[in-house]
């Protein structure tokens, strides 16, 4: 296993971290569902312990993964001395907080689930500008987290993130006590969410950067035929999966890459990839291959939105670029089911396509002349 600096913190982290959000479920260890609580416990525990035995020292879970079962199974996996071999990360379900005292209630429940006295790395989960302003700041959650640190219940405080770059910088600069951050990042997300600019900004402040969704929910692991053809013709030495991982590990700003592994074969394969990782390891031909792959994926986009933002703000608060992005992702990766899941479970209902009133103010401003109101109807019909 290769180890990397964890920002300015005194810790060398394994290149590969174990993300306990896609554990094997329902007796099928080739697939998993983070929304299912039917975890195959024996197999999940075997996977986590195998990873730890082979050098992984960062385990990540969350209150809501597998409907709460992930933390319980992770706690069981860390019995028998395994807890002392790793840094344990889990997340406060900020989106469930309705009053300030909920922070402590959820934290105490998590400590019990995980069978531990403390959390090494505690994250405010899935922050956006809206949650930062209307939950974290409104209920002064930071002060509760600081008290939990003083009590020894958590060692380090950070956040995971799902919004745009401006919101990321606002949150990062909004509190001097952040000690790490976690973002969605892969070679297709260089300008989405925090993106490359956000990673570099966080690293410039000395913060460790934890990467989630390195394979974009598995989409980059099974690319369409035209993308596979690009990889084949490149003559490179990497499979689609390893290419995505090595692209991340080659960047000095990346501290640890989390993988939501669903079976023991994935664990073993990813351990081999991590052992081959290094900063700056990709050759020019590999970087060129990724650029070609990115272009091939983007050519599949059906709505020609450039995310310029000229259509915004919508008088009815519809987030037009984000609705387009969700739908385009479903087309690009041939996975409308995942886009639908995000649309219905994780997208702010006050900003969805169904709120479009067809006033067409946005269409007058759109440089691409996109028939936005027509697309909003179609998007909600197919994703809603």
Image: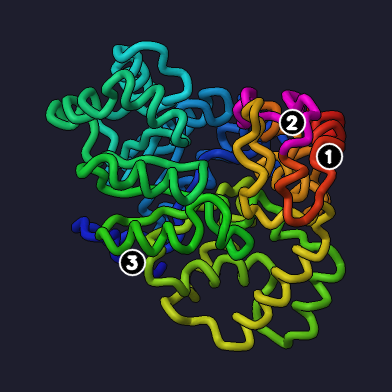
How far apart are the two marked residues, 2 and 3, measured between alpha carbons? 42 Å
Q: Nearer the viewer, residue 229 or 39?
A: 229
Q: Residues within 10 Å of mark 1 (few under 14, many from 20)?
A: some
Q: Residues within 10 Å of mark 2 (few under 14, many from 20)?
A: many
Q: Nearer the viewer, residue 374 or 286?
A: 374
Q: Please tell me which of labels 1 and 3 falls first in the chain.
A: 3
Determine whether, in the image, residue 358 is placed left or right of residue 97.
right
Q: Is residue 10 above or below residue 377?
A: below
Determine whether, in the image, residue 242 is placed left or right of residue 101.
right
Residue 317 percent across, percent down from the top left: 62, 28
Determine whether label 1 and label 2 are within 8 Å by CB.
yes
Select label 1 or label 3 by which is in front: 1
Q: Secondary structure at mark 1?
A: helix
How far apart are the two marked residues, 1 and 2, measured between alpha carbons? 8 Å
Q: Residue at x 69, y 29 (%)?
A: 352
Q: Is residue 279 above or below residue 9?
A: below
Determine whether label 1 and label 3 are within 8 Å by CB.
no
Determine whether, in the image, residue 172 is placed left or right of residue 248.
left
Look at the image and give the residue range highlighted in magenta: 346-361
Q: Secondary structure at mark 3?
A: strand
Residue beneath disc 2: 353
Select label 2 or label 3 by which is in front: 2
Q: Residue at x 51, y 39 (%)?
A: 45
Q: Per the image, is 349 magenta?
A: yes
Residue 44 percent across, percent down from the top left: 56, 39
Residue beneath disc 1: 375
Residue beneath disc 3: 4
Q: Nearer the viewer, residue 244 or 24?
A: 244
């Amino acid at each position: 296993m290769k180890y990397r600096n964890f920002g300015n913190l005194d810790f060398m982290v394994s290149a590969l971290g174990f993300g306990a959000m896609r554990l094997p479920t329902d007796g099928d260890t080739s697939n998993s569902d983070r929304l299912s609580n039917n975890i195959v416990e024996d197999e999940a525990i075997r996977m986590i312990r195998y990873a730890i035995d082979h050098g992984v020292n960062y385990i990540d879970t969350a209150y809501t993964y597998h409907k709460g079962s992930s933390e319980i199974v992770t706690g069981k996996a860390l019995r028998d001395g395994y807890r002392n071999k790793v840094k344990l990360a889990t997340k406060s379900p900020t989106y469930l907080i309705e009053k300030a005292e909920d922070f402590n209630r959820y934290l105490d429940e998590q400590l019990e689930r995980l069978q531990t006295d403390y959390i090494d790395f505690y994250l405010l989960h899935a922050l956006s500008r809206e949650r930062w302003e209307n939950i974290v700041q409104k209920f002064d959650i930071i002060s509760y987290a600081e008290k939990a640190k003083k009590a020894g219940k958590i060692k380090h405080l950070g956040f995971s993130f799902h919004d745009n770059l401006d919101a990321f910088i606002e949150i990062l600069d909004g509190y001097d006590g952040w000690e790490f951050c976690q973002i969605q990042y892969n070679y297709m997300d260089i300008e989405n969410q925090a993106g490359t600019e956000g990673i570099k900004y966080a690293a410039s402040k000395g913060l460790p950067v934890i990467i989630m969704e390195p394979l974009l929910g598995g989409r980059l692991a099974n690319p369409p035929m035209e993308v596979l053809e690009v990889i084949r013709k490149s003559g490179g030495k990497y499979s689609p999966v390893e290419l995505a991982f090595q692209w991340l590990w080659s960047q000095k700003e990346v501290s640890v890459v989390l993988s939501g592994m669903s079976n023991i074969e994935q664990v073993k394969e990813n351990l081999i990839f991590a052992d081959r990782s290094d900063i700056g390891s990709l050759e020019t031909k590999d970087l060129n291959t990724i650029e070609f792959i990115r272009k091939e994926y983007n050519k599949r986009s059906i709505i020609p939105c450039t995310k310029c933002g000229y259509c915004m703000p919508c008088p009815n608060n519809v987030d037009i670029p984000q609705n387009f992005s969700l739908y385009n992702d479903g087309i690009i990766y041939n996975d409308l089911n995942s886009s639908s899941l995000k649309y219905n479970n994780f997208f702010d209902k006050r900003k969805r396509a169904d709120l479009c009133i067809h006033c067409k103010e946005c269409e007058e401003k759109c440089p691409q002349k996109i028939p936005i109101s027509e697309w909003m109807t179609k998007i909600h019909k197919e994703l809603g």
